[in-house]
Image (tube, rainbow, N blue to C red):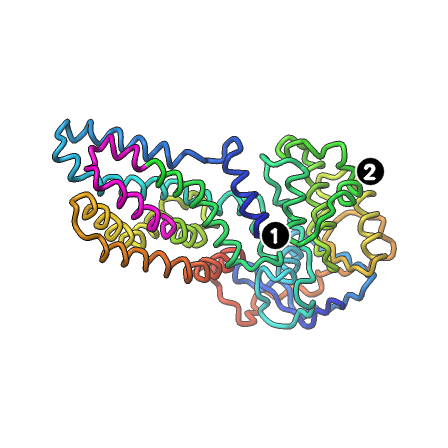
Amino acid sequence: MSLNVTDLTIARGGLPVLNGLSFALDPGQALILRGPNGSGKTTLLRTIAGLQPALSGTIDAGEDQIAYAAHSDGLKAMLSVTENLQFWADVFGQNDIEPALRAFDLTTLQDRLAGTLSAGQKRRLGLARLLVTGRPVWVLDEPTVSLDTASVALFADAVRVHLGQGGMALIATHIDLGLDEAAILDVTPFAAKPEARFGASDEAFL
Amino acid sequence: MNALLIRDLRLAVRAGGGLGLGLAFFLIVAVLVPFAVGANTDLLSRIAPGVLWIGALLACLLSLDRILALDFEDGTLDLLATAPVPLEAALSIKALAHWITTGLPLVLAAPILGVLMSLPPQGYLWLVVSLLLGTPALSVIGTFGAALTVGIKRGGLLLSLLVLPLYAPTLIFGAEAARRGAAGADVSTPMLLMAGISAGVIALMPFASAAALRINLR
């Protein structure tokens, strides 16, 4: 089980953003994506998660292996912390949400409505969702937004435990997570030239 | 699957969930029409099946954009699309949840509102049966419309325009069945046609909805 990306070209809004990107991720490895705003990190992660098709190239990750966490956490304001997490656990066929609550220090908040949580607490709940998916490949888009340093450390610990269990993590972030073992991939050199089309349809102008 | 249904139902009954929106609208229509038409019992009982059907249909339409728009805004749809549940099944469940919170209350309220509309006594059974068979189609077609317009800000108008023509066959056969029932005539032909439409859209529409949603999530 590993994640292999070969010669990938992806587009956002009909315009190619990244071209010729290849990397491989084996169990226990983490890869940090870096690059300026608009360089295509989110598009790359969405493509790998299967939410949009690639223009060319292959993504080999196996069936149902990827847990994706986007900018928004998919929380329902009118459900409690436990109800939100239990819902995702049920969807992914898992039962025990206690370890996830403990890993992100949410035990004391578990009966609060998600709508009454602070931004950082919501993010912790969104990240706790990853633990209840039971999937080996974490694809995370700016996971540390609105987290304080203590929570970033909690997150880094969770990633480390996940890697230790043979999991993989692909993380787009701008800050230093303290994950010294993680490789870093800067996507800037793979930026597609503006005039290159790669068969993309310019649907934004249609 | 059950988790999604339970979550949707739970959200509907919590504050701001929109349960009762359709029902309140249905009630308003049935209360106001007799005022507007006048206290002419003959006329009222003749138009009752049609007015109740239009009321139910518009009440259904009112809550359609809630099926997916809220889940789209908070990112749930992205996460659901990467979950092990097939999108077709997830959308069928969401349509079912919409029917339970909107269609079913309308079916149950229809006999009571029939009294306000002076519906003839023999019409009650067929009104309820026609709504029971027809409203699931409204929810399933509505989910397709919601999937088509999910990324659009204030897509409610577009949603209504897209969905209304698709609602027409259900309305025509449903109201005709209810009308024939009220007049004491044979209801089998329109009722069977409408049941066929419902069965067909329940079986096929989720695939179209899922395809539309996948494109909108890109």
Characterize the magenta stretch by its predominant secondary structure: helix
Q: Residue at x 51, y 34 (%)?
A: B13
Q: Is residue A205 left or right of residue A164?
A: left
In the depicted structure, whether residue A77 falls above or below residue A6: above
Residue A150 tag number: 2
Q: Is residue A92 magenta?
A: no
Q: Nearer the viewer, mark 1 or mark 2?
A: 1
Question: Label 2 amino acid?
Answer: Ala
Percent x, y for residue A53? 57, 65
Dot 2: what SS?
helix
- Using the image, determine if residue B72 lies above or below residue B194: above
Relative to the observer, which residue lies in front, B183 or B148?
B183
Q: Gap in Å between the C-alphas at discs 1 and 2? A: 26 Å
Dots 1 and 2: beta carbons under 8 Å? no
Residue reaching furthest to the right? A180
Residue A137: where, in percent of width, then height? 73, 59
Query: Which range of residues does the magenta coloring cover?
Result: B110-138
**Is the C terminus of chain B in the top left, top right, bottom left or bottom right quadrant?**
bottom right
Q: Measured from the top left, where is residue B199 in percent x and y? A: 37, 59
Q: Amino acid at mark 1?
A: Leu
Residue behind mark 1: B79
Q: Residue at x 34, y 51 (%)?
A: B133
Q: Which mark is residue A187?
A: none
Left/right placement of residue B67 relative to residue A160 reads: left
Chain on which label 1 sits: B
Q: Considering the numbered disc 1 on the image, is that residue within a helix, a strand or a loop?
A: helix
Total numbered labels? 2
Question: Up-down: is A49 above or below A83?
Answer: below
Tell me which corner region of the image, top left, top right, bottom left or bottom right, holds residue A79: top right
Q: Badge 1: how crowded within 10 Å, few (<14), some, or many (20+)?
A: many
